[in-house]
Image (spheres, rainbow, N blue to C red):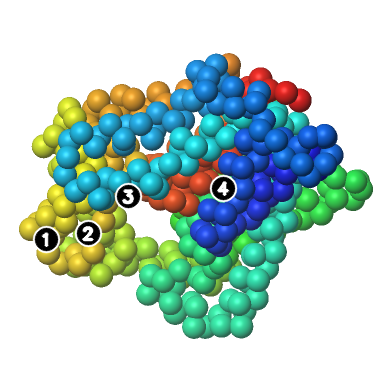
């Protein structure tokens, strides 16, 4: 058994568990932590020993600034505790954000991943999400009428785990599939490229069938930016424009051809109309829009240092109760940047943005297509919701970013 095989096995388990099992996600993270600290001596045996070179890298994180910068996102919340408030809520936020500190340090200790190993994990994601999508589709087929009615009432299509996280992983699997196909990837047999292309198209279509907005917005944002990048680099303006037009006609076609997609659009339209009429108390979008208004109010009242992570929950609850009594469920600001402004003010945001952008900017990592595509995904997600305040969102962000940074930047033993 080699250390790298041990790590890759737990990476695969981590990747699979993101779609349906928080408990398995925690177990795989603990497995990765153990794998980071040990090596097998002699090579190929099962006899573990402390990996001293890896531990030395752990205590010198500044030598790998791209990975170290991610930890700043954790430190912002840590230092916000000096502002007091509900310290149990602050501690709960810290616990959720621990992966922002721990996972980059683990990847710093890992051996450097080769391209074929990173591609293999992407391939696993595509195969796994295809299997999960097939099961979800069969379940829908057996209960189509009932599920369509639930969608019209604002309920999601049943999926393994959280439907938003599932749709985001689905969109990312499509991106990985397109990337691997352009790299002419296959494990053993050339016909696997045809399988890869077929699964990528299947997942692309299924994402429309699933009709979860987060996944769709993420995917089409990547298509738009990467399409414009392709047009700029190749100067194939006509072909690029036609390709983008065809892709963006897909949602229109889905509206007329996919009942679940049409039901979701109709619900969204009704929800927005009810919000404009100030009658949206029981509808999801009204709560999200109001959460943004509340977050902005808190920021305006505490612009420099914010209200503090320990105070945010009580203040949000108070404002919802006093100013929006018809909305029964107070929500935190559904935008990560606004959440940072409300809790830590302009000072916190001035630390958050460089820490968020630096890993992609460092050594011009954005020139790698998967780094750029992943950064688009991460950016869209923090605009759509407070993605780095959610366990699943943090797990997704840290794993896929650190995987790429390890492959591109980390100077470790091969």
Asked if residue 60 lies left or right of residue 182, the reply is left
Is 269 situated above or below 410?
A: below
Q: Position of residue 268 (x, y in %)?
A: 37, 63
Of 204 and 303, which appears nearest the observer? 303
Q: Where is residue 112 in the image (x, y as percent from the top left)?
A: 70, 28
Q: Dot 3: what SS?
A: helix
- Residue contact between numbered discs 2 and 1, judged by CB atoms under 8 Å: yes
Residue positioned 25% across, 70% down in the render: 282
- Residue contact between numbered discs 3 and 4, judged by CB atoms under 8 Å: no
List the residue tagged with mark 2: 330
CA gap between label 2 and label 4 equals 32 Å
Q: Dot 2: what SS?
A: loop
Asked if residue 61 lies left or right of residue 173, the reply is left
CA gap between label 1 and label 3 equals 23 Å
Q: Residue lying farthest left?
A: 322
Quadrant the C terminus occupies: top right
Q: In which quarter of the image is residue 179?
A: top right
CA gap between label 2 and label 3 equals 18 Å
Q: Quadrant of residue 383?
A: top left
List the residue tagged with mark 4: 29
* Mark earlier in primary sequence (1, 3): 3
Of 36 and 370, which appears nearest the observer? 36
Asked if residue 7 lies left or right of residue 299, the reply is right
Q: Dot 1: what SS?
A: helix
Badge number at residue 321:
1
CA gap between label 2 and label 1 equals 8 Å
List the residue tagged with mark 3: 92
Residue positioned 60% across, 51% down in the render: 28
Of 383 and 103, which appears nearest the observer? 103
Residue positioned 56% across, 47% down in the render: 29
Mark 4: few/some/many CA within 10 Å (<14, 14-19, 20+): many
């Amino acid at each position: 058994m080699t250390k790298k095989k041990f790590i890759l096995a737990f990476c695969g388990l981590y990747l699979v568990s993101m779609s349906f099992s928080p408990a398995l996600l925690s177990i795989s993270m603990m497995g990765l932590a153990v794998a980071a600290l040990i090596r097998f001596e002699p090579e190929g045996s099962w006899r573990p020993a402390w990996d001293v070179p890896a531990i030395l890298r752990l205590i010198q994180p500044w030598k790998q600034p791209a990975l170290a910068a991610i930890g700043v996102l954790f430190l912002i919340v840590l230092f916000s505790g000096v502002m007091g408030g509900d310290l149990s809520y602050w501690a709960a936020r810290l616990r959720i954000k621990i992966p922002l500190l721990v996972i980059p340090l683990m990847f710093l200790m890992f051996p450097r991943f080769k391209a074929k190993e990173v591609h293999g994990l992407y391939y696993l994601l595509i195969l796994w999400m295809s299997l999960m999508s097939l099961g979800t589709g069969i379940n829908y087929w057996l209960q189509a009428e009932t599920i369509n009615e639930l969608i019209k009432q604002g309920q999601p299509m049943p999926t393994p785990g959280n439907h938003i996280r599932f749709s985001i992983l689905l969109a990312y699997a499509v991106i990985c599939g397109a990337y691997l196909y352009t790299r002419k990837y296959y494990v053993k047999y050339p016909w696997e490229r045809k399988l890869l292309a077929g699964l990528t198209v299947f997942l692309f279509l299924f994402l429309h069938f699933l009709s979860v907005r987060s996944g769709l917005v993420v995917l089409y944002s990547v298509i738009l930016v990467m399409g414009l990048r392709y047009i700029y680099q190749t100067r194939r303006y006509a072909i690029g424009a036609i390709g983008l037009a065809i892709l963006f006609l897909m949602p229109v076609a889905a509206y007329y051809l996919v009942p679940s997609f049409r039901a979701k659009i109709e619900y969204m339209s009704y929800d927005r109309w009810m919000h404009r009429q100030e009658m949206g108390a029981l509808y999801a979008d009204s709560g999200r829009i109001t959460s943004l208004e509340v977050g902005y109010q808190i920021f305006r009242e505490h612009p420099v240092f914010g209200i503090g992570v320990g105070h945010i929950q009580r203040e949000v609850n108070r404002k919802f109760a006093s100013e929006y009594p018809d909305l029964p469920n107070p929500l935190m600001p559904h935008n990560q940047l606004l959440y940072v402004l409300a809790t830590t003010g302009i000072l916190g945001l001035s630390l958050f943005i460089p820490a968020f952008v630096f890993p992609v900017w460092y050594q011009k990592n954005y020139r790698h297509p998967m780094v750029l595509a992943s950064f688009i995904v991460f950016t869209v997600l923090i605009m759509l919701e407070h993605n780095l305040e959610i366990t699943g969102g943090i797990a997704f962000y840290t794993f896929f970013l650190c995987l790429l940074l390890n492959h591109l930047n980390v100077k470790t033993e091969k």
